[in-house]
Image (cartoon, rainbow, N blue to C red):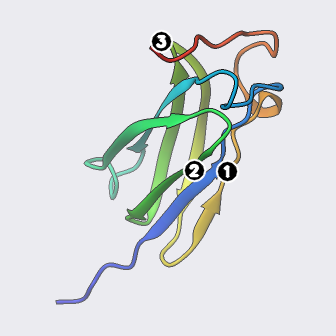
Amino acid sequence: MATVRKGKVLGKLRWQEIDPRNKLVRIHISLTGDDVETRDVRLGRDFMLGRVYEFRDVPPGAYRLVAAAGGTTMWDMKVQVSADKDVVMDLTNGNSSVSSDFDPPAAD
């Protein structure tokens, strides 16, 4: 049986001038399959703003990446993953779906 070669989705999480040493902001990122080949793939976990996020061993195909802080969706993007490739997608106020004056809540 052939081994399915997988890819990786990663990037920096930045919002305005928030520094994780001064304010911890938890961002929940989910990567959900968005086509027939990936429809059963659902990955998700929390990352800290000001750091790097990474999903490894992602099967090739189309995905939807959604990232939220405190129940507010800050990013909602389409991602195409290829075998043995890294998809670098930084999440910043420049490509967010919310206003750049949004103040994400600090982590509990």
Callout 1, which amino acid?
Met
Local packing at callout 2 (Cα closer than 10 Å; few below 14, some 14-19, many 20+) is some
- Earlier in the chain: of badge 2 and badge 1, it is 2
Callout 2, which amino acid?
Val
Residue on which disc 3 sits: 71
Callout 3, which amino acid?
Gly
Residue 85 appears at what percent x and percent y? 57, 74
Number of marks: 3
Quadrant holding the N terminus: bottom left
3D distance between C-alphas at marks 2 and 3:
22 Å
Quadrant holding the C terminus: top left
Q: Which mark is residue 79?
A: 2
- Earlier in the chain: of badge 1 and badge 3, it is 3
Q: Tell me the SS state at disc 3.
A: loop
Is the residue 86 above or below the residue 88 in the image?
below
Is the residue 3 above or below the residue 62 in the image?
below
Which of discs 2 and 3 lies nearer the camera? The answer is 3
Residue at figure coordinates x 81%, y 16% from the top left: 100
Residue at figure coordinates x 75%, y 34% from the top left: 92
Q: Tell me the SS state at disc 2.
A: strand
Residue at figure coordinates x 83%, y 31% from the top left: 94
3D distance between C-alphas at marks 1 and 3:
21 Å
Corner quadrant of residue 42: top left
Is the residue 14 above or below the residue 17 in the image?
below
3D distance between C-alphas at marks 2 and 1:
9 Å
Residue on which disc 1 sits: 89
Residue at figure coordinates x 50%, y 64% from the top left: 8
In terms of depth relative to the viewer, which is nearer, 15 or 2? 15
Residue 44 appears at what percent x and percent y? 37, 40
